[in-house]
Image: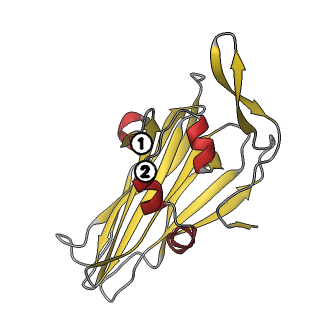
């Protein structure tokens, strides 16, 4: 990875309403499948930090923190969200992102439950940055072994569409490379081939 940092905006937190709730985490993923807060392990811009209270009640209801954070080129980030309704798990979803200069500038919103006490509306911007959306096969090529139970839990495409909406703010100037494993004398290495790979998340283009 290059030492040049890719700066992205990320939001994480929760909303707890009378009949529903939702959580949103933004995590850095490293091999074999280690997940850490992307805001904590990245280089945060403290002056950019904002807090949004989820409900009209200060002590309950939760809230979301948004800040700009720098990570090295090629860092793998996962947006992970869960929603419950009337105490029952309703949907869970995750989107894997590989930060890359020249990639499409993405804006990803998380969809939130609403109620009389909520203050944030039904969507909240969860990520803005130049990144490629990766399939689970591409994530595996990077040496990240996503457990089957995680993929079963967070990889349902209907639930991904139900909890996230992805927009391209600006097209990238370098197409998404295809990641391939190549055998060399020093072992298997991952190389990027300059072809556009198929996206698995519905994207709205402006």
Quadrant position of the C terminus in the picture? bottom right
111 vs 136, left or right, is left
Horizontal side, residue 155 vs residue 52: left or right? right
Quarter of image, res 29:
top left
Quadrant in the picture for residue 186: top right
Q: Are marks 1 and 2 in contact (CB under 8 Å)?
A: yes
* Residue depicted at 49% across the width and 71% down the height: 163
Q: Residues within 10 Å of mark 1 (few under 14, many from 20)?
A: many
Residue extending farthest to the top is 185
Measure how far apart labels 1 and 2 are at the Cα level. Answer: 6 Å
Task: Point out the tag, 1 or 2, that comes first from the N-terminus.
Answer: 2
**Residue lying at 36% horizontally and 78% vertically, measured from the top left:** 119
In this rendered view, identify the residue nearer to me: 116 or 111: 111
Given residues 138 and 127, the one toward you in this image is: 138
Dot 2 lies on which element?
A: strand
Give the percent coordinates (x, y) of residue 5: 56, 30
Q: Residue at x 60, y 33 (%)?
A: 74
Checking the image for residue 26, the label placed there is: 2
Looking at the picture, how far across and down is residue 58, in whole percent? 20, 71
Reading the image, the residue beneath label 1 is 38
Residue 177 versus residue 79 in the image, above or below: above
* Numbered circle sitting on residue 57: none
Q: Secondary structure at mark 1?
A: helix
Q: Pointer 2: residues within 10 angstroms few (<14), some, or many (20+)? A: many
Residue 3 drawn at (x, y percent): 56, 22
Q: Is residue 55 above or below residue 50?
A: below
In this view, the residue farthest toward the bottom is 116
Residue pictured at 28% horizontal, 80% vertical: 17
Q: Is residue 24 left or right of residue 88?
A: right
Q: How is the image coloured?
A: secondary structure
Closer to us: 19 or 62: 19
Q: Is 126 rendered above or below residue 96?
A: below
């Amino acid at each position: 990875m290059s030492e040049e940092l890719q700066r992205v905006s990320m939001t994480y937190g929760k909303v707890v309403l009378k009949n529903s709730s939702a959580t949103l985490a933004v995590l850095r993923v490293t091999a074999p499948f280690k997940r850490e807060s992307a805001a904590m392990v990245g280089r945060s811009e403290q002056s950019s930090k904002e807090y949004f209270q989820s409900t009209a009640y200060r002590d309950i209801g939760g809230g979301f923190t948004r800040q700009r954070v720098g990570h090295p080129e090629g860092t793998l980030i996962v947006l992970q969200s869960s929603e419950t309704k009337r105490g029952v798990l309703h949907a869970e979803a995750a989107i894997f992102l590989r930060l890359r200069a020249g990639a499409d500038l993405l804006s990803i919103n998380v969809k939130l439950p609403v109620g009389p006490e909520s203050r944030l509306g039904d969507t909240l911007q969860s990520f803005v940055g130049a990144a490629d959306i990766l399939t689970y096969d591409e994530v595996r090529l990077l040496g990240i072994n996503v457990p089957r139970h995680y993929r079963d839990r967070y990889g349902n495409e209907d639930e991904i569409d139900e909890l996230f909406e992805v927009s391209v703010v600006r097209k990238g100037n370098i197409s998404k490379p295809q990641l391939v494993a190549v055998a060399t004398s020093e072992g298997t290495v991952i190389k990027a081939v300059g072809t556009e790979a198929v996206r698995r998340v519905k994207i709205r283009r402006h």
